[in-house]
Amino acid sequence: MEVTALNIIRRVDILQNLIKVDNGLLFEKTATNFITENILDNYENSCYQEALKLFQCNKIADTVEVLATLRTNNLLNLFANPCDKKWNSLIATNNSDIRFCGDCKRNVFKVYNKEDYRERKQLNQCVVISFYLEEQVIESTSCEFTEYRDFELLGSPSTID
C-alpha cells in the first residue's frame, strides 16, 4: 500500500507542476502516457482521464481539484495526519535524521525505506519521506524533457494497511 500511494503522489506532483509552469502540451502528453502505461489501478486511471478531459476543455481549476483529491486520498493512505511543513523548517537536533516540530512538540524521523517507515509507524512517530525524482516526462522529436525535483512528505503514519 505505501509504495503504491507514494508512486501515485509522485505522478500527481509531476502533473500539478506542469500545470503550475503552464506547460499544457507536456501536461497532456504526460497524463496520456500515465494512462497508456497500463500500470494504474482503475481509480487512478479514471482520475487522470477526467483530469485530462477537463484540462482539454480549459477547466484548469477543476483539473487541479481532481488531482488534489487523488493526492489527498493517497496521502491519507500513508499518513493519519499529513503535514504541510518542510523538513528544513523543523528544528535541527544532534541527529541529522531527526528534527523537532515546534508546533506539535514531536520529533520527526527521516525514513529511507519501507522498513524504516513501518518501524516508525509501529512506534506512532512522525516521519518525513524524502525522495529525489528523476523522471523522463516526455520525449518529442526535437527535445527530451526530464524533471528533477526533491519531494518531501511529512506526517504521522497511517494505521491503514
Image: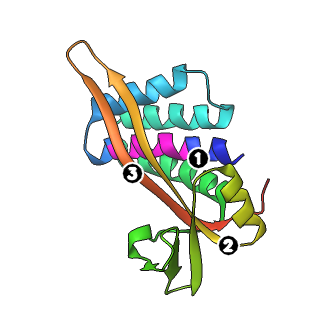
N-terminal label among 2 and 3: 2
Q: Main secondary structure of the magenta part?
A: helix
Instruction: Single out the residue that lies furthest toward the top.
Output: 141
Label 2 close to label 3 by CB (< 8 Å):
no
- The residue shown at (28%, 28%) is 145
Q: Is residue 81 among what the camera can see?
A: no
Secondary structure, mark 1, is helix
Q: What residue did someone put label 3 on?
A: 150
Quadrant (top left, top right, bottom left, bottom right) of the N terminus? top right
Amino acid type at image mark 1: Leu
N-terminal label among 2 and 1: 1
Magenta span: 8-17
In the image, which is nearer the foreground, mark 2 or mark 1? 2
- The residue shown at (39%, 70%) is 88
Task: Residue 54 in the image: state x and y as whole percent.
Answer: 43, 37
N-terminal label among 1 and 3: 1
In the image, which is nearer the foreground, mark 1 or mark 3? 3
Above or below: residue 62 compared with residue 91: above
Q: Is residue 41 among what the camera can see?
A: yes
In the rendered structure, find residue 125 and report the number of the disc placed on it: 2
Q: Residues within 10 Å of mark 2 (few under 14, many from 20)?
A: some
Q: Is residue 87 left or right of residue 76?
A: left
Amino acid type at image mark 2: Gln
Label 1 close to label 3 by CB (< 8 Å):
no
Q: What residue did someone put label 1 on?
A: 6
